[in-house]
Amino acid sequence: MNSSRIPQIIDDVLAVNPKTLWLQLGIRNDEAVAPCVEAGINVIPDTCIAIEYRFCAASNKTDDNAGTTT
């Protein structure tokens, strides 16, 4: 999928009414997703879930010696 195809999925997204619409890295069309934002759907554009997961996992590692989150 690319950014120009986002308008084609908006009706389906609105019908399903998810909490969040996640658009992969390189996919962004602010005008097309505006109805989703207006409907209260969180929109996360141009973001890779695998990269974000690794970032979150790395920042949530615990210090085994102290037993605290770093």
Image (cartoon, rainbow, N blue to C red):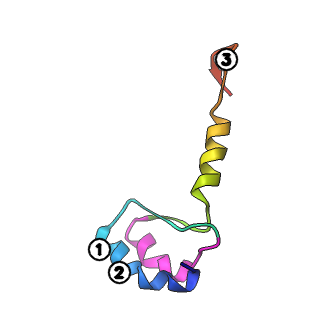
Residue 8 magenta: no
Q: Is residue 63 left or right of residue 36?
A: right
* Dot 2 alpha-carbon crowd within 10 angstroms: few under 14, some 14 to 19, many 20 or more: few
Residue for badge 3: 64
Q: Amino acid at mark 2?
A: Asp
- Please identify the quarter of the rendering in which residue 41 is found: bottom left
Q: Which mark is residue 7?
A: none
Is label 2 or label 3 in front? 3
Q: Earlier in the sequence, mark 3 or mark 1?
A: 1
Circle 1 sits in a helix, a strand or a loop, which is it?
helix
Q: CA distance from mark 3 to mark 1?
A: 46 Å
Where's residue 42, x and y in %?
Answer: 46, 62
In the image, residue 33 above or below residue 17: below
Q: Which residues are magenta?
A: 26-41
Residue on which the image places disc 1: 15
Asked if the residues shown at circle 1 and circle 2 are in contact, with their CB atoms under 8 angstroms apart, the answer is: yes
Q: In which quadrant of the rendered image does the C terminus lie?
A: top right
User: Mark 1: which amino acid?
Assistant: Ala
Location of residue 24 in the rendering, given as x and y in whole percent from the top left corner: 57, 67
Q: Nearer the viewer, mark 3 or mark 1?
A: 3
Q: Position of residue 45 (x, y in %)?
A: 57, 68
Image point (29%, 73%), residue name: 15
From this view, report whether residue 10 is shown above or below residue 24: below
Write down the residue under mark 2.
11
Task: Please tell me how crowded label 1 is: few (under 14), some (14-19), or many (20+) other residues with Cα within 10 Å.
Answer: few
